[in-house]
Image: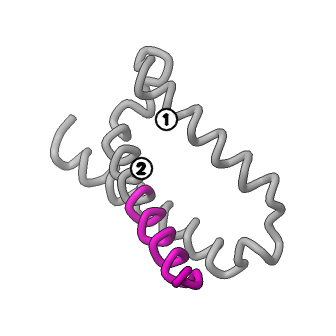
Amino acid sequence: MTIGGTVNKTAMSLAILLVAAMDVWGRGVADDLPMGLVIGGVIGGFVVALVTAFKQTWAPYTKYMEWYGGFGLLVTLVWLYLEILRLLAKLPSRD
């Protein structure tokens, strides 16, 4: 893969991400989107991530995206950690 191809694929991925984020941000998860669809997307994404990580021969089209998935997982775990800390800070103390 050339540098130009890498830049083009990255730009296309960013454009798709921005369009999807604007769509979800505009609608809101609680407004129209059923929770089953959200859970199905999470499970589907997890399955694709596992297939990409452990069976690269099954998923040749997602092979180049595994670092993006790893980074997304890291950001998600940090975000969850911070949100849990924020929620724990709101709990009343037992003094």
Task: Classify 86 as above or below 40.
Answer: below
Judged by its main secondary structure, the magenta piece is helix
In the displayed structure, does residue 29 sit left or right of residue 25?
A: right
- Dots 2, 1 in contact, CB < 8 A: yes
Q: Amino acid at mark 1?
A: Ala
Q: Using the numbered discs, state the Cα–Cα distance from disc 2 to disc 1 in whole angstroms.
A: 10 Å
Residue 84 in percent (x, y) is at: 50, 68
Task: Classify 79 as above or below 39.
Answer: below
Q: At 40% from the left edge and 45% from the top edge, which residue is drawn?
A: 69
Task: Classify 58 as above or below 86.
Answer: above
Q: Is residue 83 rendered magenta in the image?
A: yes
User: What span is in magenta?
Assistant: 77-95
Q: At 45% from the left edge and 72% from the top edge, which residue is drawn?
A: 85
Residue 14 in percent (x, y) is at: 40, 62
Label 1 sits on a secondary structure element that is helix
Q: Earlier in the sequence, mark 2 or mark 1?
A: 1
- Where is mark 2, residue-wise? 73
Task: Classify 42 as above or below 34.
Answer: above
Q: Amino acid at mark 2?
A: Leu
Disc assigned to residue 49: 1
Residue density around tag 1, few if under 14, some if 14–19, many if 20 or more, within 10 Å: many
